[in-house]
Amino acid sequence: MSDTSAIDGLIDDFSYLEDWEDRYAHVLELGKSLAPLNEAEHNTESHVEGCVSRVWLIKEPQSQGDDPVLSFRGDSDSLIVKGLIAIVLMVFSNRSASEILELNAQEVFDALGLNQHLTQQRANGLAAMVRRIKAEAAAAQSS
């Protein structure tokens, strides 16, 4: 993988937060900083199935070719989920399709301490977002 600075920075930020309450507050702040999608973008095509809260993700190709670079935008009706989306976007955006497919998101989430504190429903929603992004990368790579 070429550039891990976004992931490294995210892990570094979380490493300074000693307890889950501080990490939770940081996730909420990340959610507040996420730019919302417009109403037209809240549609069935961008909706992510498998999340308890409503989640929308939009793929934005940054380059073309056999291994395009992809960026993503997202939104949710839940502030904590918006924070999780912000984390997912930091991990996956501005990467080539092959990098996205190779990236082990579970390792990143473990390093952040997310998995041990998320409810099963939230963890399932996080996994659904990752599956969606990887499916978008696979589709972009094959087209």
Image (tube, rainbow, N blue to C red):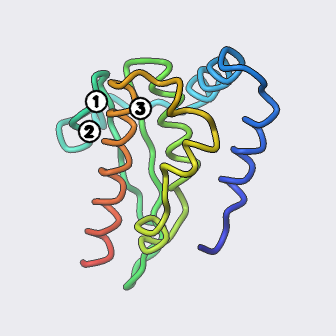
Disc 2: which residue: 48
Q: Please, what is the three-letter code of the amino acid marked with disc 2?
A: Val
Q: Position of residue 50 (x, y in %)?
A: 23, 34
Disc 1: which residue: 51
C-alpha distance separating marks 2 and 3: 10 Å
C-alpha distance separating marks 2 and 1: 7 Å
Q: Please, what is the three-letter code of the amino acid marked with disc 1?
A: Cys
Tell me if mark 1 has few (under 14), some (14-19) or many (20+) residues whose alpha carbon lies within 10 angstroms of its own: many
**Residue 134 sits above or below residue 127 on the image:** below
What's the residue at 54%, 28% (across, down)?
A: 83
Sequence-first tag of 1 and 3: 1
The number of numbered badges drawn on the structure is 3
Disc 3: which residue: 75
C-alpha distance separating marks 1 and 3: 12 Å
Disc 1 vs disc 3: which is toward the camera?
A: 1
Q: Position of residue 124 (x, y in %)?
A: 32, 34
Q: Quadrant of the C terminus?
A: bottom left
Tell me if mark 2 has few (under 14), some (14-19) or many (20+) residues whose alpha carbon lies within 10 angstroms of its own: many
**Residue 107 sits above or below residue 115 on the image:** below
* Element carrying mark 2: loop
**Residue 14 occupies quadrant:** top right
Q: Is residue 26 left or right of residue 102?
A: right
What's the residue at 62%, 29% (across, down)?
A: 30
Tell me if mark 3 has few (under 14), some (14-19) or many (20+) residues whose alpha carbon lies within 10 angstroms of its own: many
Disc 2 vs disc 1: which is toward the camera?
A: 1
- Camera-side residue of 44 and 96: 96
Q: Please, what is the three-letter code of the amino acid marked with disc 3?
A: Asp
Q: Quadrant of the N terminus?
A: bottom right
